[in-house]
Amino acid sequence: MASDLDFSPPEVPEPTFLENLLRYGLFLGAIFQLICVLAIIVPVPKSHETEAEPSEPRSAEVTRKPKAAVLSASKRPKKEAKKKR
């Protein structure tokens, strides 16, 4: 009776190309997510270049004003009410 038992490992087909692509794609996606989470958690020291950048918001405010002027210039003037006869 002991000779009837088969203890060999079951036959498992080798993964196809698409299965391998899916597996490694999922690994790369998981690594990317971990890097993103670590980038949020770990603070990055500020460099001297970022200290010189506060002048940029002033220039951004200057660029916003002409945009508002362009928007108001592009609006059509309101139609005058027709005279009732």
Image (cartoon, grey):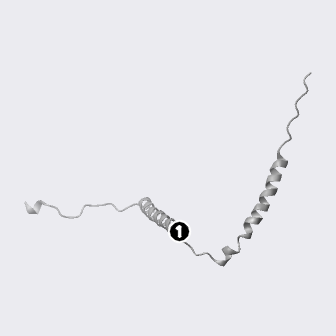
Tell me where residue 39 appears, x and y as whole percent.
53, 68
**Coordinates of residue 7 in the picture (x, y in percent):** 18, 64
- How many numbered discs, if any? 1
Q: Depth check: 37 or 30 in front?
A: 37
Rendering coords of residue 31 (x, y %):
47, 67
Quadrant where the image shows the C terminus: top right
- Amino acid on which the number 1 mark rests in the picture: Ala
Residue 6, by quadrant, is: bottom left
Q: Secondary structure at mark 1?
A: helix
Residue drawn at the location 25% of the way across and 61% of the way down: 10
Q: Residue at x 82, y 52 (%)?
A: 70
Residue 75, image x, y percentages: 82, 44
Against 72, residue 13 (above or below) is below
Q: Residue furthest left?
A: 1
Residue located 76% across and 65% down the image? 58
Q: Is residue 53 left or right of residue 73?
A: left
40 to the left or right of 78: left
Q: Going 80% across and 57% down the picture, which residue do you hit?
A: 65
Q: Which residue is mark 1?
A: 39
Q: Decide if residue 62 is on the left or right side of residue 45.
A: right
Q: Looking at the rendering, which quadrant does residue 81 occupy? A: top right
